[in-house]
Amino acid sequence: MKYFNLYIACACLLFFGSIHAQQTPADKQSKAISIEGATAHLGTGEVIENALIMFNEGEITFVGSANMKIARIGDVIDGKGKHVYPGFIIPNSTLGLVEIDAVKATDDDSEIGTWNPNIRSIIAYNTESKVVESMRPNGVLLGQITPRGGRISGTSSVVQFDAWNWEDAAVKTDDGIHINWPSNFKRGRYWLGEDPSLKVNKEYGNQITEIEDYFNNAKAYLKASPSITNLSYKALEGIFDGSKKLYINVDDEKGIIDAVNFTKKNTIPNMVIVGGAEAYKVTDILKSNNISVVLNRIHSQPSQTDDDYDLPYKSAKLLVDNGITVALQANGQMERMNSRNLPFYAGTTVAHGLTKAQALQLITLNPAKILGIDAQYGSLETGKSATLFISEGDALDMRTNIISHAFIDGRLISLETHQTELWKRYSKKYQSN
């Protein structure tokens, strides 16, 4: 009976999935396009009023003023009164790894075990995800797909959000490895009758030693060149030679300091703090070691009772003002659904001190730099990928971010989603009454 129910459930998923499949990925750009008259937000801090942007074969060929006497190429899109932005980028995301939280068969964001550096999230990435599809109408066009769980979760990859399969989606495979750093404090599991109050984690020192031992064993393995391959140790090779970044999930001040010292001790050249709730307390250390921060979702409550009530909102400004490269993520409760709100998180930082140009960089050029894809993505510049979109208004404002056109590598992508199909269906019903 158990297996029969499973077969029925799978059949239903396949049936309904075939009815409401994701939009067909766009064809390769075959004709040049010019966008004329829009306000171009380049992502570099520069804004061009009455701009002209031209691109062909997936690459931007011109960015400048529309007043310049230069021949327009291909189809011309009238952008007067509109705004053009680089495609938004979301780091540290599980998009495409989980479709429905309540359906275990669609959840593939973590593996069993503590040490999983060899686990590659790109293999599990589902390009047919309806959740991924819903990112595009808000301008979120690229993301870093990241595994969860364990002490070392695995290896992430960067993808674009309009593809037939993960091979087509991949922008940068195996860009980094993710560690969940131990916390200095912990709460008891109230559901087991334990005291839920915050207490010192007495195992913290032992947990750090375990990480150090694991990395020491990996270095010894890599130096020895053994005949039998250890996939877990082999996966860490890129961390030591600099071809991969080490992303350390840590929030508290002491944990951040310990994580930085750990990377220095192990001569790991590229490290990023993920979370960083108290990163503003150690900006000198971060800046001197050229360490970037992927901040926790800023639409959240302060983590400590003595924190400022608006600390999550102003954390980005506290870091940016001290010269730290900052990107925003949506990690947390209902993270995949909330990922579409990435531009509005950036908009909130404007209300708490950043300029709009600085806020835009939090979700464009900064994450591109952190993920190592800034040579092609993250800003509107000649020679870069034509991954961009046109909005009716300010893309950081949920009231005016209404997208008319979106392009990934020059391909005009569909902005239809399951939600827009439902809206059209039921708006007609109620309009007829």
Image (tube, grey):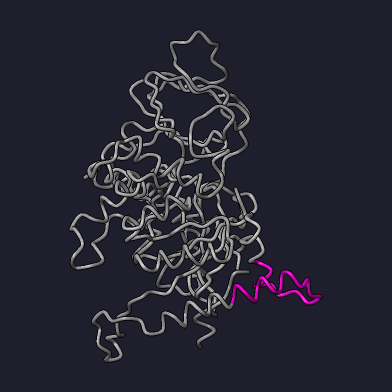
Q: Quadrant of residue 411?
A: top right
Residue 145 shown left or right of residue 284 in the figure: right
Q: Quadrant of residue 312?
A: bottom left
Prevailing SS of the magenta stretch: helix
For the C terminus, the image quarter is: top left
Above or below residue 138? Residue 393 is above
Above or below residue 59? Residue 14 is below
Whole-percent x, y for residue 91 in the image = 46, 53
Q: Which residues are magenta?
A: 214-235
At x 47%, y 10%, the residue is 68
Residue 49 shown left or right of residue 28 in the figure: left
At x 51%, y 79%, the residue is 209
Toward the viewer: 390 or 64? Answer: 64
Toward the viewer: 29 or 83? Answer: 83
Whether the magenta-drawn stretch holds residue 211 is answered as no
Toward the viewer: 429 or 126? Answer: 126
